[in-house]
Image (spheres, grey):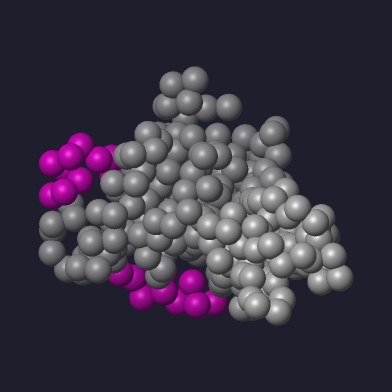
C-alpha cells in the first residue's frame, strides 16, 4: 500500500506523522519505504537518522545556443511559452530558471543552433533507516522547479514493499499533485486553527478532484474551535486520529525521538493502516 501524507501548509506535523507511520509499519512486520518529497526543506532524516548509501545529482535538460550558428530568426523565442529563451537584437539569451525542458526551441530552430545540456537542480540520497528503505530529494539553492527532484525521489519507490509512505510537499502545488498519483490513500494533516482550516479547504477540494481515497488527522486538536470537526462530520470525511497539544510530544519531536513520537501517535497510525487495508483490492497494489 502507498500512503501519501499531505498538508495544506507547512508546520502541521506532516513529517512527524509520515516518519512515525513508516516506523510503526516496519516494527509490526511490514516491509516499509519512506520517500521524502519535501525537497525544498526535507527533514524526515532528522527523525529517521538514515544511513545514506547512494548520493547522486538530479539534472534537467536546458537549451544551449551556438551563437556561431544562430541566424537570429527568433523562432525559438516565439515557440517558448514561458520566456525561457529570448531573442535580442544582437543575441539569443536563455533563462534556465524559466525553461520547462520541453525541447520546442531545439525542434523549431531552422539553423540547428540549439542543443540541450544537463543542468543540476538538486540531489537524491538513498539508503536505509534501520529496516526502512529511505529516499530523499533536495532542491539546490536558488532553483525554482522542484518537480524533477520529486520525480527522481518517487522513481526510487520499490514495487515489492508492503508499505510506502510518501512525505508530500506542503500546499496544493503541481509538486504535491505529482506525489498523489502514486498513492492509494492520502492522509491530510490539518490543525484546528483558522489558517489550518482555510488551507485544509483548499487541499480538500484538490484531493476530491483527483478522486483519491483520503482521510484526515487533526493536529493541535484542542486548540481553536470545533469548526474543522463539524466540517469533517457534515461531509462524511474520515478522521483517522486527533493529536492534542502535548509538551512531551513536542519535546520528543525536538529531540528527534521517533520511538516516543510513535508511541504518542499509536492509535492514529493503527487507524490509518486499518483504513488503508480496508480499501478495495483494486485500489491497492
Query: Residue at 54% across / 77% down in the picture?
Result: 255
Please state which of residues 216 and 123 is positioned toward the viewer in this rendering: 123
Q: Is residue 284 visible?
A: yes
Taking 284 as reference, is 114 above or below it?
Answer: below
Q: Position of residue 211 (x, y in %)?
A: 37, 34
Query: Residue at 36% across / 76% down in the picture?
Result: 247
Taking 46 as reference, is 167 above or below it?
Answer: above
Q: Is residue 244 magenta?
A: yes
Residue segment shown in magenta? 230-255
Query: Residue at 82% across / 55% down in the picture?
Result: 112
Please state which of residues 22 and 231 is positioned toward the viewer in this rendering: 231
Image side of residue 51 versus residue 101, left or right: right
Query: Residue at 29% across / 46% down in the picture?
Result: 205
How many numbered marks, from 0 up?
A: 0
Q: Quadrant of the C terminus?
A: top right
Q: Quadrant of residue 192?
A: bottom left
Q: Is residue 281 magenta?
A: no
Q: Position of residue 153 (x, y in %)?
A: 67, 53
Q: Quadrant of the N terminus?
A: top right
Q: Position of residue 240 (x, y in %)?
A: 33, 45
Q: Is residue 47 visible?
A: no
Image side of residue 90 versus residue 197, left or right: right
Q: Position of residue 53 (x, y in %)?
A: 83, 60
- Outermost residue toward the right in this view: 68
Q: Quadrant of residue 123?
A: bottom right
Q: Quadrant of residue 84?
A: bottom right
Amino acid at each position: 500500500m502507498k500512503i501519501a501524507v499531505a498538508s495544506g501548509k507547512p508546520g502541521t506535523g506532516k513529517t512527524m506523522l509520515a516518519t512515525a507511520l513508516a516506523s510503526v509499519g516496519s516494527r509490526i512486520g511490514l516491509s516499509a519505504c519512506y520517500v521524502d518529497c519535501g525537497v525544498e526543506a526535507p527533514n524526515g532524516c532528522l527523525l529517521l537518522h538514515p544511513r545514506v548509501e547512494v548520493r547522486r545529482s538530479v539534472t534537467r535538460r536546458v537549451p544551449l545556443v551556438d551563437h556561431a550558428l544562430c541566424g537570429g530568426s527568433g523562432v525559438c523565442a516565439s515557440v517558448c511559452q514561458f520566456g525561457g529563451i529570448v531573442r535580442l537584437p544582437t543575441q539569443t539569451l536563455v533563462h534556465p530558471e524559466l525553461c520547462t525542458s520541453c525541447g520546442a526551441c531545439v525542434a523549431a530552430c531552422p539553423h540547428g543552433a540549439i542543443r540541450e545540456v544537463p543542468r543540476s537542480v538538486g540531489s537524491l540520497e538513498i539508503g536505509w533507516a534501520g529496516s526502512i528503505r529511505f529516499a530523499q530529494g533536495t532542491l539546490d539553492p536558488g532553483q525554482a522547479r522542484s518537480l524533477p527532484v520529486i520525480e527522481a525521489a518517487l522513481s526510487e519507490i520499490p514495487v515489492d514493499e508492503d508499505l510506502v509512505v510518501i512525505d508530500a510537499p506542503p500546499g496544493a502545488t503541481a509538486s504535491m499533485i505529482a506525489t498523489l498519483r502514486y498513492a492509494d490513500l492520502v492522509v491530510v494533516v490539518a490543525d484546528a486553527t483558522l489558517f489550518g482550516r482555510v488551507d485544509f479547504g483548499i487541499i480538500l477540494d484538490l484531493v476530491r478532484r483527483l478522486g483519491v481515497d483520503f482521510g484526515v488527522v487533526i493536529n493541535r486538536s484542542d486548540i481553536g474551535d470545533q469548526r474543522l470537526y463539524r466540517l469533517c462530520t457534515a461531509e462524511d470525511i474520515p478522521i483517522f486520529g486527533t493529536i492534542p497539544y502535548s509538551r512531551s510530544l513536542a519535546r520528543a519531536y525536538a529531540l528527534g525521538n521517533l520511538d516516543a513520537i510513535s508511541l504518542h501517535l499509536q492509535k492514529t497510525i493503527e487507524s490509518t493502516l486499518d483504513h488503508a487495508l480496508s480499501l478495495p483490492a483494486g485500489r491497492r497494489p
